[in-house]
Image (tube, coloured by chain):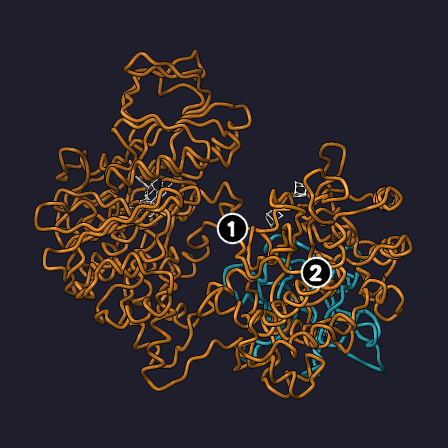
């Protein structure tokens, strides 16, 4: 419990704002977070929007899908893929991306962030 | 056991990696490296100039060593070795004792003692620091030179060109280029090719002096010739780093190198040497693959296993400035008992030579220049003494059919044939992993590492995987990805048959899992090819490639380009003004494209709908520059203005461009129409090209510009306009229905059995009885056309998707940044 004290659920948008099986970019102060509605699996994911490969703000515009069981997103620039669960790069050698928890309540979508980030 | 490695280069690193993979117990590993960064991929060093960072080239990050409990000192060379007391001490004053010491000190560039080598502007080509210094110097330089016309010298010459020093001389002491790898005829052809791209080559030239004050200004040669030069790279060979070993009393060779036996042991039984510093039977092995093999042997020696180094094949293949050059086995074999078969095509710049034993049964070696596709197969045939077919010349001549031969070839190789020499993986290794469930190339790469080095063996590994599966009775098809067990053509038929219209429907009906970046755009394109419905509809937007999804090409930095259609390249002054005004209003970079239209770059995602609204109002439509679809039909000015023109090429080009606009295909399609045989529209480099004749039009198909140019072939001659369109209908539809994904018409034709004659039979003579069906399918697509941008800006739901922040739709991406160039903006360079 103590740990959750300095974290907050940040209201990002409404469910209908996010295309099914696609992503959008959420502005949180100076940060950009990619939010995905994996409608096929009934799941939501959030990650950093910046692709670590060439530092492009692009992951929210990437295609999502699966590799085996692992849900993933492919950067539109050079198709590096990252696990939506762990953030690890699945296509080799780029560093991992940050991932965040997502909650949907009454058609609103929230992302779990450090309180000082929002 | 405490092991110290001196040198953290490619081989030194490989030693660590291979040793760690064995999970050894009770071993303490310490590495001293002289360079400031951990080992990097020197073989691909030149890619530093094409955008790779030092980090991209890293073999493994510093944390890897930590994670494996290896103590790594970088930027701290060993200065002293005491064999008696078994200690080393470093420049920074660290002294460590060892049980075993491994030299992996590599080599340095050999710099001949020419007066003036110390001047500014003279470089060597070995480390990232060398390249950084070259990069800093090059902008000041105009005339470059490279001493050394061998493998590395030519690579350095390419680097000079990449750095913008295009006026570069290669100076070779020997009478010809690459004397150690290729024969005279090969050198001559290579030289001609290099000269044709602008390199100057001086052979039989000995440099006497490098002139200039502090800074190089020129070179003086033996024949009293002089050359103005302000940047010079010396690449005259390598010199093994044996100085430390020598001072400590280890045996070294007269021309350098630390003497080793077949266990990689030096003259001291506690000291080993591997890689480019080791001298085995009078030879320094200046390639990575033998170095890696030495690392393997050294580990066996240390762990008490039995493995010996017995020399290594020095065959090489490389790409020099876009030209394949390979030599294998004994490239020069020429005594009376040997038959050499030579194929030389100066027009195409191809030279191939194979040396065959007198009885015609075995391949001894050879040389390939200009086209080295068969390299791997020939190398393996040679190394494994595979018995040759009855007409051995076929192995270099009849390669056009490609795959089938390659395939049969793989079968004939023995199990111990080394397929991936970088990682020492044999055919047997690959087969057994396939049998244990690694059934595709990715899986094989992961479990054997085959194909992860230089990558040259990947086609062969694929063949082996497929053949092994086949031999197990597993039917191998060209399946799309893990989510669909169908080829593109099979899936197209299914989607058609079941009248499926969205990606999700297709996935649920015929696939499994959740899709990926391979099958999504492919299926989305199939659906578009079949029905030509608005591509963002029915939830298909998120299955489209990013470019199709936002109806614009994503550019460096995350902005998009806007390309309105300008059919046939014809545009009114008023429309030109509108483009100019829009570009000004939204601060866009403008450029005329190769396809006779105007690109507007640097648009924010958020601005796209408004920009298009303005363009559409002025009568423009989407140019589909973002889609695998018809791009442009280029036209010459034709009979309306040109005094040679036979017909009105512009009108015909416009008619055709408007007919096929928006239709989705396996890849982009381009067309051209010329008003006479002078061919100013370059129609023969297009997927379909139409050229006016006295009697009508000649139709050419399957041409290609791009990286593999190919002339279009004549499909029909002297036909009238209606027939021409009917043939193009059939041709395009047949292509759309049968091509593999992302295959241009040229490649499609090359793979089509029967080639152009077969295609002509289908399209012109209707041999399959498909003509009518193909035409009516095409007509349906034509009738269904709507401008996607018009549909997008008019529909609020679609329009909403064109914002960067979902929770701040009016705000633009604040990280987008531009630089200024020639009074316009440009995207910021990759960081
Ligand atoms: C531009 C270029 C292109 C090449 N292309 C190819 C190719 O296409 N195919 C191919 O097979 N090979 C190629 N090579 C050759 C290949 O890079 C070498 O064979 C390979 O790097 C040898 O590895 P090594 O570990 O023995 O030596 P190196 O990679 O040179 O590593 C030796 C390291 O030891 C360090 N060292 C030396 N003395 C000390 C000391 N006293 N204390 C601590 N550290 C020390 C050095 O600074 C260096 O970092 C190329 C080389 C270059 C330069
Ligand atoms: S191709 Fe012929 S008609 Fe067209 S511009 Fe050239 S010369 Fe004139
Ligand atoms: S050739 Fe084409 S892909 Fe390559 S840089 Fe130029 S525009 Fe881009
Ligand atoms: S920027 Fe994302 S893959 Fe290159």
Q: Which chain letter matches label 1?
A: B
Name the image quarter holding residue B219: top left
Near mark 1 (Cα within 10 A), the count class, few <14, some 14-19 or many ≥20, is: few
What's the residue at 51%, 34% (across, down)? B163
Marks 1 and 2, the one that precedes in the sequence: 1
Measuring from the top left, give residue B348's x and y in whole percent. Answer: 40, 46
Chain that is cyan in the image: A
Which residue does the numbered mark 1 point to in the structure image?
A: B709
What's the residue at 60%, 54% (across, down)? B686
Image position of A61 (left or right of B574): left
On the question of residue A49 being in view, the answer is no
Chain B's shade in the image? orange
Which residue does the numbered mark 2 point to in the structure image?
A: B721
The vertical placement of B440 against B308, above or below, is below
On the question of residue B816 being in view, the answer is yes
Which secondary structure, mark 2?
A: helix
């Amino acid at each position: 419990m103590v740990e959750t004290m300095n974290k907050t659920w940040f209201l990002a948008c409404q469910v209908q704002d996010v295309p099914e099986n696609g992503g959008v970019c959420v502005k949180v102060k100076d940060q950009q977070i990619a939010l995905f509605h994996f409608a096929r699996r009934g799941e939501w994911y959030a990650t950093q929007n910046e692709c670590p490969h060439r530092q492009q703000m692009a992951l929210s515009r990437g295609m999502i899908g699966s590799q085996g069981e692992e849900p993933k997103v492919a950067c539109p620039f050079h198709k590096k893929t990252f696990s939506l669960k762990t953030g690890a790069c699945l296509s080799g050698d780029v560093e991992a991306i940050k991932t965040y928890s997502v909650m949907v309540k009454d058609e609103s979508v929230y992302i779990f962030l450090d309180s000082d980030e929002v | 056991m405490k092991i110290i490695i001196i040198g953290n280069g490619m081989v030194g690193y490989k030693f660590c990696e291979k040793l760690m993979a064995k999970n050894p117990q009770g071993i303490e590993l310490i590495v001293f490296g002289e360079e400031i960064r951990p080992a990097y991929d020197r073989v691909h060093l030149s890619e530093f100039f094409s955008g790779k960072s030092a980090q991209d080239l890293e073999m493994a990050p510093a944390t890897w060593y930590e994670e494996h409990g290896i103590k790594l000192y970088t930027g701290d060379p060993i200065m002293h070795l005491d064999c008696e007391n078994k200690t080393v001490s470093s420049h920074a004053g660290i002294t460590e004792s060892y049980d075993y010491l491994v030299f992996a000190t590599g080599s340095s560039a050999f710099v001949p003692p020419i007066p003036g080598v110390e001047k500014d502007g003279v470089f060597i080509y070995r480390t990232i620091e060398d390249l950084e210094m070259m990069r800093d110097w090059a902008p000041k330089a105009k005339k470059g030179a490279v001493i050394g016309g061998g493998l590395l010298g030519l690579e350095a010459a390419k680097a000079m060109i990449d750095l913008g020093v295009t006026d570069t001389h290669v100076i070779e002491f020997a009478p010809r280029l690459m004397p150690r790898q290729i024969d005279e005829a090969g050198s001559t052809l290579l030289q001609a090719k290099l000269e044709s791209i602008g390199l100057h080559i001086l052979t039989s030239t000995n440099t006497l002096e490098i002139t200039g004050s502090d800074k190089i200004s020129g070179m003086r040669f033996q024949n009293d010739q002089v050359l103005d030069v302000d940047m010079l790279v010396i690449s005259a060979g390598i010199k093994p780093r044996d100085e430390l070993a020598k001072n400590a009393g280890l045996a070294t060779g007269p021309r350098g190198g630390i003497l080793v036996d077949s266990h990689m042991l030096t003259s001291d039984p506690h000291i080993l040497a591997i890689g480019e510093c080791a001298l085995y039977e009078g030879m320094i092995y200046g390639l990575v693959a033998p170095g890696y093999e030495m690392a393997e042997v050294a580990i066996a020696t240390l762990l008490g296993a039995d493995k010996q180094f017995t020399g290594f094949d020095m065959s090489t293949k490389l790409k020099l400035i876009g030209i394949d050059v390979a030599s294998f086995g004994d490239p020069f074999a020429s005594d009376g008992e040997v038959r050499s078969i030579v194929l030389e095509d100066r027009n195409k710049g191809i030279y191939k030579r194979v040396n065959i034993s007198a009885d015609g049964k075995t391949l001894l070696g050879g040389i390939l220049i200009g086209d080295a596709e068969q390299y791997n197969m020939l190398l393996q045939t040679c190394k494994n003494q595979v018995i040759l077919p009855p007409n051995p010349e076929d192995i270099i001549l009849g390669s056009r059919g490609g795959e089938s031969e390659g395939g049969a070839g793989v079968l004939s190789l023995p199990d111990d044939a080394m397929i991936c020499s970088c990682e020492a993986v044999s055919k047997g290794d690959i087969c057994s992993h396939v049998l244990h469930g690694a059934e595709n190339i990715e899986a094989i790469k992961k479990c054997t590492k085959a194909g992860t080095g230089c990558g040259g063996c990947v086609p062969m590994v694929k063949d082996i995987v497929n053949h092994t599966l086949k031999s197990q009775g597993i039917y191998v098809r060209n399946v799309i990805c893990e989510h669909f067990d169908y080829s593109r053509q099979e899936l197209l038929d299914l989607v058609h048959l079941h009248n499926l219209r969205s990606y999700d429907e297709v996935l649920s009906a015929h696939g499994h899992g959740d899709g990926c970046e391979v099958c999504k755009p492919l299926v989305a394109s199939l659906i578009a090819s079949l029905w030509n419905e608005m591509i963002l509809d029915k939830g298909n937007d998120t299955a489209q490639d990013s470019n199709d999804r936002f109806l614009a090409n994503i550019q460096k930095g995350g902005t998009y380009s806007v390309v309105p259609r300008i059919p046939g390249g014809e545009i009114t002054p008023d429309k030109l003004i509108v483009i100019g005004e829009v570009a000004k209003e939204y601060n866009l970079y403008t450029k005329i494209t190769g396809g006779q239209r105007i690109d507007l770059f640097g648009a924010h995602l958020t601005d796209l709908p408004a920009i298009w609204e303005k363009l559409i109002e002025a009568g423009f439509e989407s140019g589909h520059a973002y889609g695998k679809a018809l791009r442009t039909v280029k036209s010459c000015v034709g009979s309306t203005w040109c005094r040679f023109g036979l017909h009105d090429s512009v009108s015909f080009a416009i008619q055709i461009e408007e007919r096929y606009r928006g239709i989705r295909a396996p890849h982009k399609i381009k067309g051209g129409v010329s008003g006479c045989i002078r061919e100013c529209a370059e129609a023969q480099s297009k997927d379909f090209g139409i050229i006016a004749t006295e009697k009508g039009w000649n139709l050419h198909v399957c041409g290609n510009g791009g990286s593999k140019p190919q002339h279009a072939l004549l499909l029909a001659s002297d036909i009238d306009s209606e027939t021409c369109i009917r043939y193009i209908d059939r041709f395009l539809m047949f292509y759309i229905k049968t091509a593999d994904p992302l295959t241009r018409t040229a490649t499609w034709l090359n793979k089509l059995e029967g080639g152009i004659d077969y295609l002509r039979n289908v399209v012109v003579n209707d041999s399959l009885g498909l003509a009518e069906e193909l035409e009516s399918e095409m007509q349906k697509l034509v009738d269904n056309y709507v401008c996607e941008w018009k549909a997008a800006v008019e529909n609020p739901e679609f329009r909403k998707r064109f914002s960067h922040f979902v929770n701040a739709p009016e705000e633009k991406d604040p990280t987008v940044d531009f630089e200024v160039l020639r009074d316009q903006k440009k995207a910021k360079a990759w960081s």
